Image (cartoon, helix red, strand yellow):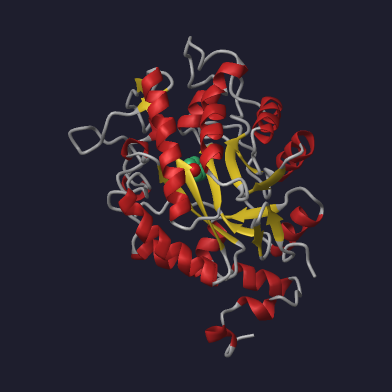
């Protein structure tokens, strides 16, 4: 049997294989509510055979949404519609995961297919907050308000309340969004954090928001359930975060109870030319961080082929792969991958309603 289709156990949760659906924003909610779109989108990927399905970046507060159409888990009313989705996904053999996020200075923008640019307050946008009053730039010129200590505490308590709701909704895998230039990454990167208090400056201060938020979430997320974080491990530019300091941060998070690091990159500033786009580009970084920080890892980015995914896990570069776009065009990618790898599990992946007709 291939390694890709070997189950993976983290804490008390066993995934049937090492293929995860990476969190992908759908920009299809009204006031944060998941709806039939999310049910079908996520449910289809569970039926398609993924071991873990992670719900898109889900906001911990209304101002933490990237766009007004982001999903959110900032009221108790969000729990029930998410529970319907987790119930269906688990019934079809997938572990239900969710990514919790606050978009910081990249909040209050139009959906990608409506321009991806800042929405003014007159147009229904909102005031954004960030570690420092520095705009992202280019298509997001809105200058955020520098967060006070009270703002920091408020956002951290929003992460805690959202974690409790995620648990109530039946999720068994939680990922905190520390990547892609959103709020936590804005604290981590010197490019967006120019604070002069204990939340800015040296490494210790720049990771404080992340460490405190992580500890607060870990405190309410059950010890026996996996807690992951997605981290932009490099900003790809001088003066930004580096893989070396991200290894230090990964070790610190591991000591604080991190179960898996989702290795990602960039997006804290616009127009970075140095991104080395290539197949499996983050796999060597994930391998190094996993080895040096002694932490389980996963990654995404241009992992598209069954053999490539198999090599990534069988060579020990990562414990699990996260696929995104490939799974948009083919929810049955796990089934097709098992067939391509000649794996016997292919016959068990499709639900009986389909398997009776297709093998
Ligand atoms: C990839 C690159 C930049 C942003 C997210 C919308 O992380 C994103 C995103 C994904 O939620």
On-image quarter of the N terminus: bottom right
Q: Quadrant of residue 211?
A: top right
Whole-percent x and y of residue 212?
A: 53, 27
Residue at position x 73%, y 40% from top? 295
Residue at position x 65%, y 28% from top? 249
Residue at position x 68%, y 64% from top? 17
Left or right of 198? Residue 334 is right
Whole-percent x and y of residue 115?
A: 33, 43
Left or right of 256? Residue 331 is left
Q: Quadrant of residue 284?
A: top right
Is residue 147 among what the camera can see? Answer: no
Residue that extends furthest to the bottom in the rendered view of this protein: 357
Residue at position x 55%, y 20% from top? 206
On-image quarter of the C terminus: bottom right
Q: Quadrant of residue 351?
A: bottom right
Residue that extends furthest to the top in the rendered view of this protein: 196
Is residue 168 among what the camera can see? Answer: yes
Whole-percent x and y of residue 80?
A: 36, 59
């Amino acid at each position: 049997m291939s390694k890709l289709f070997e189950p993976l156990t983290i804490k008390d949760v066993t995934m049937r294989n090492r293929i995860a659906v990476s969190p992908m924003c759908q920009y299809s909610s009204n006031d944060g509510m998941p709806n039939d779109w999310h049910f079908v989108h996520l449910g289809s990927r569970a039926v398609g055979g993924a071991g873990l399905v992670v719900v898109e970046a889900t906001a911990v507060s209304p101002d933490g949404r990237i766009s007004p159409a982001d999903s959110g888990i900032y009221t108790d009313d969000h729990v029930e519609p998410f529970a319907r989705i987790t119930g269906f996904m688990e019934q079809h053999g997938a572990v239900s995961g969710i990514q919790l996020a606050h978009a910081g200075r990249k909040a209050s923008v139009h959906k990608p297919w409506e321009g991806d640019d800042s929405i003014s307050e007159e147009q229904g946008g909102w005031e954004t907050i960030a570690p420092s009053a520095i705009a992202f730039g280019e298509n997001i010129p809105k200058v955020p308000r520098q967060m006070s200590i009270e703002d920091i505490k408020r956002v951290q308590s929003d992460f805690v309340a959202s974690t409790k709701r995620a648990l109530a909704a039946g999720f068994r895998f939680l990922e905190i969004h520390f990547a892609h230039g959103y709020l936590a990454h804005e604290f981590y990167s010197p490019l967006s954090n120019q604070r002069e208090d204990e939340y800015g400056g040296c490494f210790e201060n720049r990771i404080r928001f992340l460490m405190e938020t992580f500890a607060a979430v870990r405190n309410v997320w059950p010890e026996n359930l996996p807690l992951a974080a997605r981290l932009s491990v490099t900003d790809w530019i001088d003066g930004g975060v580096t893989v070396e300091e991200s290894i230090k941060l990964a070790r610190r998070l591991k000591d604080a109870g991190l179960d898996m690091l989702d290795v990602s990159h960039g997006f804290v500033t616009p127009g970075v030319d140095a991104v080395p786009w290539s197949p499996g580009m983050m796999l060597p970084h994930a391998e190094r961080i996993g080895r040096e920080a002694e932490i389980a890892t996963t990654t995404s980015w241009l992992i598209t082929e069954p053999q490539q995914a198999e090599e990534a896990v069988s060579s020990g570069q990562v414990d699990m792969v996260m696929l995104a776009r490939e799974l948009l065009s083919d929810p049955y990618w796990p089934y097709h991958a098992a067939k391509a790898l000649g794996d016997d599990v292919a016959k068990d992946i499709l639900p009986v309603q389909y398997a009776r007709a297709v093998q």
